[in-house]
């Protein structure tokens, strides 16, 4: 014998077909990690030089905390919907016993698990959703970049990854979630990721206030100062665009001889989904570039492809490619509108809030009209409201999905933002912000200088992260 062991109890769990299915979700989970790296580069490129190390460490640690927090019991909360669909006694409690971090189904080898209880794919999918929880924590951090204390942020990551994210996920994402079975549709997580992060981020940015020198000169710093390296931001966006198609493929099911279905079991196709993602990039990116040239603000050129993508995250699996092009055409305009509103109101966040509350809400609504009447929800073998494709996509239930997500985000913000601010404070002290967080927390002297000429506090800031000009006068 090649292997000196008994034949597995359930060999179908480790078949070639099972391996091929699982590989789809392994790639999707790994792609989320690549997106996190891209997000770190995006804000790293626009941060002040004296904060780049602390910014990177906070994001990285927050991602790990959010991922671990979800693993503890968050996946069990998502599985709750399937136990309800198949009338399992004490559906939530049984899900927790099976799928918490120490649960039997989470920890037994797949070949020893009865596929009637759980397929091998369910184990793999836990990691995909867990790293996505960490990804949401990284999105939220954009609203507090360069001024949010590490400890309260890490506590926020525990609350988001372990409680808020699992419940939004349970309610809005999956074929037998409570509102999917009534007609709410999502594909890549427009509700749980982007609308949630946009709402929570808005509350966080308002509570923290702007960074020193962003909207008016600071007595020591002058205006905001030079970014570390805007080229890193472009690299970060490109990394995200590369990774997204792999994530999209993991947001569905592949049934041999039947085809590809979206996560809510909408009839779809891999080719259409793949093409929709790239047409959204292209159309959104070109419109964003036009806005950038019109406003002389380069940020819109970088937000454009992401705006197109967010507008399609709920729709990639149910719209044709020409429809996706039309949807993406208007997405950067909504991002621009929210961006301008934030600026006029002195709110210091230019990425996650415009994308989440601009393109995100637009995309969540528009699929309700474009996909109106398309069959969705349910699961094969279930009955009643949980029967396969028993529901239809419609605008009303898309609004319900938005309302549920915003409501949970506001409740989370009241506890995790306002509560923590009252308890331990969430903004770094003024003197630490002035001297730089790298020096304050890591004893790392700042690289170069980002002090603006004329403040009497240091050399002229070098553009794009280069060395100060030799002709620049010093104080």
Image (cartoon, rainbow, N blue to C red):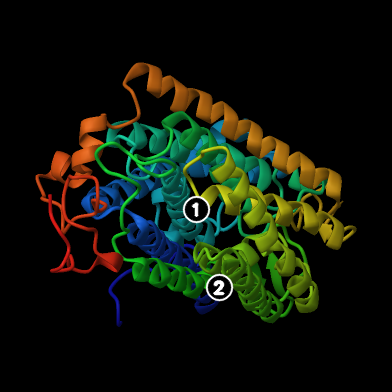
In the picture, the disc for residue 159 is none
Between 461 and 92, the one lying in front of the other is 461
Between 219 and 276, the one lying in front of the other is 219
Residue that badge 2 annotates: 245
Toward the top, the furthest residue is 422
Asked if 67 appears above or below 298 in the picture, the reply is above
Asked if 61 appears above or below 467 in the picture, the reply is above
Report crowding for label 1: few under 14, some 14 to 19, many 20 or more residues within 10 A (C-alpha).
Answer: many
In the rendered image, residue 410, in percent from the top left (x then y), is placed at 59, 30
Between 110 and 194, the one lying in front of the other is 194
Circle 2 or circle 1, nearest the eye: 2
Q: Give the tally of numbered discs.
A: 2
In terms of image quadrants, where is residue 304? Answer: bottom right
In terms of image quadrants, where is residue 309? Answer: bottom right
Relative horizontal placement of residue 469, taking residue 156 as reference (left or right): left
Between 165 and 73, the one lying in front of the other is 165
Sequence-wise, which precedes: disc 2 or disc 1?
1
Residue 37 visible in the displayed image: yes
Element class at badge 1? helix
State the residue at coordinates (68%, 75%): 276
Element class at badge 2? helix
Task: Mark 2 and mark 1 in contact? Answer it, CB < 8 Å.
Answer: no
Residue 89 visible in the displayed image: no
In the rendered image, residue 220, in percent from the top left (x then y), is placed at 24, 39
Relative horizontal placement of residue 57, taking residue 441 as reference (left or right): right
Residue that badge 1 annotates: 129
Report crowding for label 2: few under 14, some 14 to 19, many 20 or more residues within 10 A (C-alpha).
Answer: some
State the residue at coordinates (76%, 63%): 266
State the residue at coordinates (48%, 71%): 243
In the rendered image, residue 188, in percent from the top left (x then y), is placed at 61, 59
In the rendered image, residue 437, in percent from the top left (x then y), is placed at 21, 43
Distance between the Cα atoms at labels 2 and 1? 16 Å
């Amino acid at each position: 014998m090649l292997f000196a062991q008994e034949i597995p109890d359930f060999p179908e769990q480790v078949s070639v077909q099972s391996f091929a299915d699982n590989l789809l979700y392994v790639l999707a989970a790994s792609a989320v990690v690549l997106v996190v790296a891209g997000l770190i580069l995006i804000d790293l490129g626009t941060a002040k030089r004296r904060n780049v190390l602390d910014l990177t460490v906070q994001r990285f640690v927050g991602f790990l905390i959010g991922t671990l927090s979800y693993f503890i019991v968050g996946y069990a909360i998502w599985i709750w919907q399937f136990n309800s669909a198949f009338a399992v006694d004490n559906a939530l409690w049984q899900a927790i016993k099976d799928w918490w971090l120490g649960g039997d189904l989470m920890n037994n080898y797949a070949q020893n698990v009865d596929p009637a209880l759980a397929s091998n794919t369910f184990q793999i999918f836990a990691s995909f959703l867990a790293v996505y929880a960490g990804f949401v924590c990284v999105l939220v951090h954009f609203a507090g970049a360069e001024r949010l204390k590490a400890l309260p942020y890490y506590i926020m990551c525990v609350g988001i990854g372990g409680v808020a994210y699992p419940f939004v996920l349970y309610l809005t994402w999956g074929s037998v979630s409570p509102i999917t079975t009534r007609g709410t549709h999502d594909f890549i997580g427009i509700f749980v990721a982007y609308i949630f992060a946009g709402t929570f981020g808005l509350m966080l940015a308002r509570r923290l206030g702007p960074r020193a020198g962003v909207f008016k000169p600071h007595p020591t710093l002058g205006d905001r100062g030079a970014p570390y390296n805007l080229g890193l931001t472009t690299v970060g966006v490109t990394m995200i665009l590369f990774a997204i198609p792999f994530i999209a493929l993991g947001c569905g099911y592949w049934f041999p001889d039947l085809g590809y279905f979206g996560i809510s079991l909408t009839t779809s196709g891999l080719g259409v989904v793949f093409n929709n993602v790239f047409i959204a990039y292209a159309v959104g990116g070109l419109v964003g570039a036009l806005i950038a040239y019109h406003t002389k603000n380069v940020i819109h050129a970088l937000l454009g492809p992401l705006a197109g993508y967010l507008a399609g995250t709920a729709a990639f699996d149910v719209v044709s490619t020409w429809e996706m092009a039309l949807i993406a055409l208007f997405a950067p305009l909504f991002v621009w509108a929210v961006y301008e509103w934030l600026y006029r109101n002195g709110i210091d966040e230019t990425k996650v809030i415009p994308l989440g509350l601009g393109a995100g809400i637009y995309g969540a609504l528009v699929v309700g009209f474009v996909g109106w009447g398309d069959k969705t929800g349910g699961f094969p073998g279930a009955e009643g409201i949980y029967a396969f494709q028993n529901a239809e996509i419609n605008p009303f239930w898309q609004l319900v999905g938005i309302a549920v997500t915003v409501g949970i985000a506001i409740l989370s913000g009241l506890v995790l933002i306002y509560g923590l601010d009252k308890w331990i404070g969430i903004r770094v002290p003024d003197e630490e912000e002035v001297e730089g967080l790298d020096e304050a927390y890591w004893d790392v002297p700042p690289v170069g200088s980002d002090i603006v000429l004329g403040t009497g506090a240091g050399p002229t800031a070098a553009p794009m992260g280069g060395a100060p000009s030799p002709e620049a006068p010093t104080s």
